[in-house]
């Protein structure tokens, strides 16, 4: 079993009957959704809210009952991956292009469990390019303002086409090389007109579960 899957399945152990569960997006969250689907088939009673069309479709295939924000006030536990996590539990997310919905769901959660393999744990954020979601209108101007913050900013493309999020926005991948003050950078980015949100998740989790290649899993708490 791979390290991501181990971390994901450990996180699912926290889910109990009658919980509202936030379903993350990406290769690690995929394993958590798979495990939850099995537990639902075995009789676990939950309702879930997904952070992407992709995760929504997977949950439906597995028979996980889904709800919308119009039906709930808060989420009990959200399980999601990260592209980087530092020792203060600051995260970079958005490699899968779902950062805005992931942040909305995480912010509405009583408990946000981050699941990663050991390669995602870093001393300082920034080796992974920081995704920033921007509106399509005037995106050229917005990208220039992002560059003014000292990064190399690239409009995300997939198969030579500009990537469009589930919300109809673009993603700009910002290469800062290192991020010394995540909260400060987060605030500066979100003050730029045209920026919807960015992939820095600061002070949003107190719990990180790390899977290792050697088969071990460690649960870190802030």
Image (cartoon, rainbow, N blue to C red):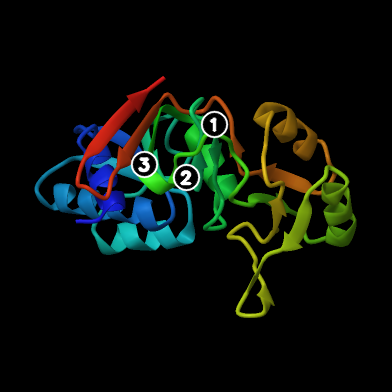
Q: What residue lies at 28% left-to-right and 64% top-to-bottom?
A: 61
Which of marks 1 and 3 precedes in the sequence? 1
Q: Nearer the viewer, residue 23 or 182?
A: 182
- 159 shown above or below 53: below
Q: Residues within 10 Å of mark 3 (few under 14, many from 20)?
A: many
- Which residue is painted at 19% across and 33% down in the image? 17
Q: Is residue 49 visible?
A: no
Horizontal relation, residue 62 to residue 98: left or right = left
Badge 2 crowding class, 10 Å Cα cut-off, few under 14, some 14 to 19, many 20 or more, is many
Disc 2, disc 3: CB below 8 Å?
A: no
Residue at (90% x, 56% y) in the render: 141
State whether residue 185 appears in this view.
yes
**Label 3 sits on residue:** 115
Q: Is residue 70 above or below residue 221?
A: below
Residue 199 rendering spot, x and y as whole percentages: 61, 44
Of the numbered discs 2 and 3, the one sitting upstream in the chain is 2
Q: Which residue is mark 2?
A: 82
Indicate the quadrant where residue 191 lies.
top right
**Residue 133: % across, % down:** 69, 52
**Residue receiving disc 1:** 90
Crowd tier of the residue under label 1, counting other residues whose Cα lies within 10 Å: few below 14, some 14–19, many 20 or above: many
Describe residue 170's horizontal placement relative to residue 6 as left or right: right
Q: What label does residue 40 carry, if any?
A: none
Give the alpha-carbon distance from disc 2 to disc 3, as whole Å.
7 Å
> Disc 3 to disc 1, how far (Cα)?
13 Å
Q: Position of residue 2 (x, y in %)?
A: 25, 55
Q: Give the position of the N terminus as an image quadrant.
A: bottom left
Report which quarter residue 166 is drawn in.
Answer: bottom right
């Amino acid at each position: 079993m791979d390290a991501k899957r181990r971390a994901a399945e450990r996180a699912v152990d926290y889910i109990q009957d009658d919980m509202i569960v936030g379903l993350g997006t990406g290769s690690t969250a995929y394993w958590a959704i798979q495990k939850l689907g099995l537990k639902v088939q075995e009789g676990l009673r939950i309702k879930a809210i997904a952070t992407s069309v992709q995760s929504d479709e997977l949950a439906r295939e597995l028979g996980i009952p889904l709800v919308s924000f119009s039906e709930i006030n808060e989420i009990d536990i959200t399980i999601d991956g990260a592209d980087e996590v530092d020792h203060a539990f600051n995260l970079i997310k958005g490699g899968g292009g779902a950062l805005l919905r992931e942040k909305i769901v995480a912010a509405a959660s009583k408990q946000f469990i981050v699941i990663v393999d050991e390669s995602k744990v870093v001393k300082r954020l920034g080796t992974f390019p920081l995704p920033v979601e921007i509106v399509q209108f005037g995106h050229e101007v917005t990208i220039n303002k992002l560059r003014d913050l000292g990064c190399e900013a690239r409009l995300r493309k997939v198969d030579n086409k500009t990537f469009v999020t589930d919300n109809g926005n673009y993603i700009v991948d910002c290469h800062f090389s290192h991020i010394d003050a995540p909260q400060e950078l987060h605030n500066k980015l979100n003050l730029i007109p045209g920026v919807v949100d960015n992939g820095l998740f600061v002070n949003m989790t107190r719990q990180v579960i790390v899977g290792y290649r050697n088969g071990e899993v460690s649960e870190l708490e802030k």
